[in-house]
Image: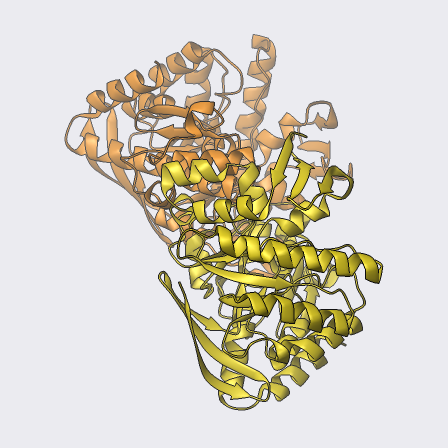
Chain colours: A orange, B yellow
Amino acid sequence: MISFEINATDGKARTAVIHTDRGDIHTPIFMPVGTRGSVKGVAPDRLKAAGAEVILGNTYHLFLRPGHELVKNHYGTLHNFINWDRPILTDSGGFQVFSLGPLRKITEEGVNFRSHIDGSKQFISPEISIEIQEALGSDIMMAFDECPALPCTDEYMIKSMDRTTRWAQRSLDARKGNNALFGIFQGGVSIEMRKKHLKDIVDIGFDGYAIGGLSVGEKKEDMYTIIKEVAHLMPKDKPRYLMGVGTPLDILTAISEGIDMFDCVMPTRNARNGSLFTSTGLINIKRKEFVTDTKPLDANCSCYTCQNFSRGYLSHLFRNKELLSPILNSIHNIHYYMNLVKTARKAIESGTLNDLKDEIAAIYER
Amino acid sequence: MISFEINATDGKARTAVIHTDRGDIHTPIFMPVGTRGSVKGVAPDRLKAAGAEVILGNTYHLFLRPGHELVKNHYGTLHNFINWDRPILTDSGGFQVFSLGPLRKITEEGVNFRSHIDGSKQFISPEISIEIQEALGSDIMMAFDECPALPCTDEYMIKSMDRTTRWAQRSLDARKGNNALFGIFQGGVSIEMRKKHLKDIVDIGFDGYAIGGLSVGEKKEDMYTIIKEVAHLMPKDKPRYLMGVGTPLDILTAISEGIDMFDCVMPTRNARNGSLFTSTGLINIKRKEFVTDTKPLDANCSCYTCQNFSRGYLSHLFRNKELLSPILNSIHNIHYYMNLVKTARKAIESGTLNDLKDEIAAIYER
């Protein structure tokens, strides 16, 4: 179980601590994504050095490989398997399953789908999702939900939300242990539907709440509108999690609207593509100008990469497809994101979050 | 410049220290290969943790990218470019150039070849090789040599060795700084030719000597015969380097014949293929039996990988092509090799090298 303690506020934003059995999570927090039990290219000691307090594991991927039963039977928990002794949040598998498109079929009972790996027939229901997440020893589990592809008709959205509500109740009923469980609400880019579904999910009662179904292809202004209109309506006394978001400015914007938790593959995926976040903006290390640039990637960054290597060396590694390239790039981008939320926490404490948001907006909207 | 100090002997084997301006190298030593300015997958801090005292850089690759002039003009030395403050040995480029086969043409002056990257026309001579190595700030440079493809006629071998002798003299004459320079002798698998060429090269006078042209496809027994017949004839008061070798047993065998220095891509290349060296033998992490194996890769190993992860997790990472797989595997294999030579040094000091060699032979010849 978790407890949630708010420390400081700045407008709608707040800093808080989520106390877990595996240590405290200081919010607002960014959670690096360890899809298949590994944050791509970043070993646990590097993650800790970057300030990571909690990472995300993907239920869908871990269910298929290596399988939650292997993890439970041989290691007890995912933490032991991957050597991460801090908290882990697991998603419900819903998002990945629905991403399979034609490979899946939804019924009231759950979702039939074919594995993207070997085409084998699989089935996940709310009960199975919770069983998997409990087997993984997740510190924060997510209720099984449908994330409808946008755009969709109001009729389908309502049908989908109502089913997700029933699945949320079934997820809660299925919980056997004392792992925390968050509810997810949907509603696409409709403020009214979002409000309705939030209420339905809150009525069930969870340890925290998450906005699902954003950053899935809708217009950025629509996402921002939803965050602005609904984040502050989420229960104040519980953690608020915006799933799968986003850019530095997305995160600062959502923090200012009262969101506490974030996850996104952007820092690691961008890193592998040579796209690096710095205090002066996004740098594409592929660009020719960096070949002879002896400066550190970010003079203001204390990460292992910036403290030890030049842009020119990172450019050389990238151009030669050296294995060290995604490693050093990922270390930096993860550090950037962890530092971003740390800076946001400090700004909230000193009442200067808006200044920080403006600063990030100026850097990343150039 | 370097100096060489022998400390202990055990039969023909010896421990020694190569004093360099960038720190001491304790021999027998293994040098991880940083082909293009990076030991694949292993950041410098991990290399140091593994006990690496000197790494190898490839002149051919660094000449083509990023170019020795970029390194010299912008960083002063390769060390600064790649953030490695310990000694670096650079090969002469000869081996890689001759590996190009039909893409190169040898003349007395040097070698014309086409870049494997973009097909551009390039030329390396002994003088240019030394210029490149000096520009890189190499602590130990290698004389430019031809490594004849085996089998070759006695006639060609003699012609080639004589040219390599002239190139060795030209390499020495071309040296402008005080970087150490080693001579390389060839001779294929003929004891007589090896002895002749060793004498020719020694007559010129270098800071150390290297056996070139072994481990290039000849029979293992032929390689062992050459090592046995010629290693002890190399000057006692200078470092002896066996280039591009080899397996743990190759290294122990050569150490027992008096060789001091080794380099090989085997630990990192094998690591990427899931082939891992352990105190009980070679493990192929691909094998199904490791999927549920919760034991560390090597219970006797103190590396980051073995101290923190199980065989089952390494198997999972490998099977899912996770970026962390080659990283953790490479950390381990490099550590294994560094530990192997460290153990050999201790064995020489205690007069038990033969026991160690027998032990390694028993493990790796099973």
Q: Nearer the viewer, residue A109 or A33?
A: A33
Across and down, in percent, residue B358 comes to 68, 85
Relative to B119, B51 lies left or right: left
Across and down, in percent, residue A212 comes to 48, 25
Across and down, in percent, residue B85 comes to 37, 55
Q: Nearer the viewer, residue A82 or A194?
A: A82
What residue occupies the far bottom of the structure in this picture?
B351
> In the displayed structure, would residue B232 be above or below residue A152?
below
- Residue beneath the point at 53% across and 82% down: B14
- Residue beneath the point at 28% across and 37% down: A342
> In the displayed structure, would residue A70 be above or below residue B207?
above
Q: In which quarter of the image is residue B190?
A: bottom right
Q: In which quarter of the image is residue B158?
A: bottom right
Instruction: Report whether residue A291 is seen.
Output: yes
> In the displayed structure, would residue B156 be above or below residue A304?
below
Across and down, in percent, residue B220 comes to 78, 70
Relative to B144, A304 lies left or right: left
Relative to B222, B267 lies left or right: left
Question: For the image shown, how many numbered marks are present on the structure?
Answer: 0
Q: In which quarter of the image is residue A302?
A: top left
Instruction: Report whether residue B270 is seen.
Output: no
> In the displayed structure, would residue B118 be above or below residue A142?
above
- Residue beneath the point at 35% across and 49% down: A49
* Quarter of the image where the C terminus of chain A is located: top left
